[in-house]
Amino acid sequence: METEKVRLLIIGSGPAGYTAAIYASRANLNPVLYAGLQPGSQLTTTTEVENFPGYPQGVDGNQLMEDLRQQAERFGADLRQGVATQADLSERPFKITIDGSKVIEAETLIIATGAAAKYLGLEDEKKYAGMGVSACATCDGFFYRKKTVAVVGGGDTACEEATYLAGLAAKVYLIVRKPFLRASKIMQERVMNHPKIEVLFEHNAEGLFGENGVEGVHLVHRRGEADERHYDLPIDGFFLAIGHKPSSDIFKDYVETDAAGYIVTEGSSPRTNVPGVFAAGDVADPHYRQAITAAGSGCKAAIEAERFLLNAASNG
Ligand code: NDP
């Protein structure tokens, strides 16, 4: 198999990956970045990004990623298409297989592969993507001011998103498949006591309807029971909050991950348990998951990689 040696390999093309590439290329590390399955990351699936500092009028998610990409390219980062399909981090140089056909031998590695929101798997979620379906209340909630929305899920994320949306929308339905919430007590209380939130226990969403965007959801109450009941609920926005899955699978045999698959880093640094391997952005962040926090951690990862290479050079 074709082999190539690099000083720094970055995997992922979200704000973390591109920011790492900007810093690393300015530090003359000649980084090579592989964009992964979804070049430009989750941000290319949202419309307007209004909370990234530096864009007072907001910016289209695709444009923001294109700006970051060009900024990385300007300083000579080698940006490539390709997906990391296998990893051997047992010794340096680390060996990362790209598209199953090429091996990159990297002295240092930044994992910035992100996380993907989970969806229910309904055809209508794809049909109405960007037209009323969202998996990020902080990103898209603003568009539902004084409107009616539904949030699916019964965990902390769902309760947090419902509470956030209730500050903007006229009415929030929380669609929970079980007869109880899984969220922490304090979040449960916040949701149950909020005048604008109505919790629909033992409900499942089966589809969406609407002419030019979401106008309602097909619901089923007590699915599979003798008193199963189907009905339609008018809504303007449908938010998924049933969890995220970090894209860490190929690294799990080497880097420490938590029960949900997030890569564990040392304190607030991007250092993993494998010296020379750093993790930045959503793949290592179960808490904030924002473009700006991802960019910040990408910056830290590049600085750490530079220091690591300097130390390795002076020790070796
Ligand atoms: P969780 O896994 O805790 O909850 C997921 C929720 O989605 C559950 O209610 C689950 O239902 C429901 N769900 C999953 N799949 C489906 C489906 N197919 N149809 C309908 N409902 C579904 O994920 P979260 O993202 O909420 O939280 C992840 C972790 O992050 C947790 O540890 C949480 O405590 C933590 N967190 C903490 C926060 C905080 O402290 N402020 C904020 C956000 C998250 P069921 O219960 O039936 O399985």
Image (spheres, grey):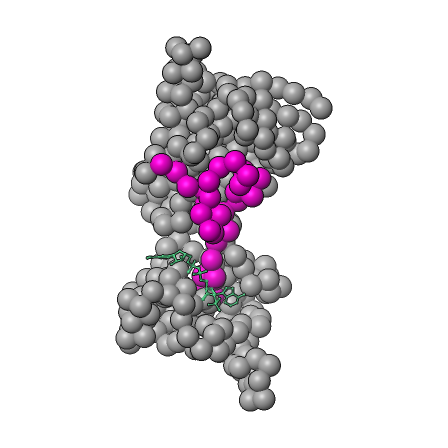
Residue shown at 45% from the left, 61% from the top:
241
Visible in this render: residue 312? yes
**Residue 60 relative to residue 100: left or right:** left
**Residue 250 relative to residue 163: left or right:** right
Give how far across and how far down residue 228 sits, in percent.
56, 85
Q: Nearer the viewer, residue 139 or 109?
A: 109
**Can you say whether 202 is above or below 20 in the image?**
below
Q: Which of 307 and 153 is in front in this view?
A: 307
Give how far across and how far down residue 204 sits, in percent.
53, 74
Please tell me whether residue 59 belongs to the stretch shown in magenta.
Answer: no
**Residue 210 relative to residue 74: left or right:** right
Query: Which secondary structure type mostly characterizes the magenta part of the structure?
Result: loop
**Can you say whether 243 is above or below 231 in the image?**
above
Q: Nearer the viewer, residue 90 or 43?
A: 90
Which quarter of the figure has residue 39?
top right
Residue shown at 41% from the left, 41% from the top:
264
* Quarter the N terminus occupies: top right
Give how far across and how far down residue 278 sits, in percent.
44, 32
Residue shown at 60% from the left, 65% from the top:
122
Total tally of numbered discs in the picture: 0
* Quarter the C terminus occupies: top left
Residues drawn in magenta? 238-266
Residue shown at 36% from the left, 30% from the top:
300
Give how far across and how far down residue 130 sits, in percent.
51, 56
